[in-house]
Image (cartoon, grey):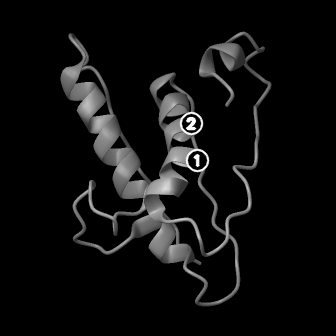
């Protein structure tokens, strides 16, 4: 796991890119969140932009992995990475003294 603090020491023009891994059908969304989403959340919290990219065959579960079921509770087994990360980010903001009213969160999601 790469800590955001290490990346902050880099010059502003340098970018850190890492592949989260290749996951098969045996990993559920909670496992993926632990393997990839937690790091993404730490990078977001450190002020960096984050890109999640799911690549695979047609009907292999890319959209489900990122978005889950549209109405899924963030704690449910069917919540996707985007839902889980967004819920945890908003919870961090809500529990951080002085952060409320001073942070702007924007999300773009593309399904191609």
Q: In this view, does 101 lie to the left or right of 41?
A: left
Above or below, comparing residue 28 to residue 18 in the picture:
below
SS at badge 2: helix
Residue found 24% across the figure and 34% down from its top: 91
What's the CA distance linking mark 2 and mark 1?
A: 6 Å
Residue 101 visible in this rendered orientation of the protein: no
- Where does the image place residue 57, in percent across and percent down from the top left? 70, 85
Q: Which quadrant of the view contains residue 22?
A: bottom right
- Where does the image place residue 18, in percent across and percent down from the top left? 76, 42
- Where does the image place residue 102, in percent across and percent down from the top left? 26, 20
Q: Check if mark 2's residue and mark 1's residue have beta carbons within 8 Å.
A: yes
Q: Which quadrant of the view contains residue 112?
A: bottom right
Mark 2 — residue? 39
Q: Is residue 68 left or right of residue 24?
A: left
Specify few, some or many for label 1: CA neighbours under 10 Å numbering under 14, 14-19, or 20 or more. some
Specify few, some or many for label 2: CA neighbours under 10 Å numbering under 14, 14-19, or 20 or more. some
Residue found 19% across the figure and 27% down from its top: 94
Residue found 64% across the figure and 60% down from its top: 53
Residue closer to the observer: 75 or 99: 75
Residue found 56% across the figure and 36% down from its top: 39
Mark 1 — residue? 36
User: Residue 55's mark?
Assistant: none
- Where does the image place residue 44, in percent across and percent down from the top left? 49, 32
């Amino acid at each position: 796991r790469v800590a955001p603090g290490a990346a902050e020491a880099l010059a502003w023009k340098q970018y850190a890119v890492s592949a989260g891994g290749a996951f098969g059908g045996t990993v559920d969304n909670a496992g993926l969140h632990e393997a990839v989403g937690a790091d993404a959340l730490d990078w977001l919290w450190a002020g960096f932009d984050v890109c999640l990219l799911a690549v695979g065959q047609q009907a292999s579960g890319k959209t489900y992995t990122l978005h889950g079921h549209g109405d899924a509770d963030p704690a449910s087994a069917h919540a996707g990475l985007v839902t889980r990360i967004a819920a945890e980010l908003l919870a961090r903001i809500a529990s951080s003294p002085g952060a409320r009213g001073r942070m702007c969160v924007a999300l773009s999601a593309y399904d191609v």
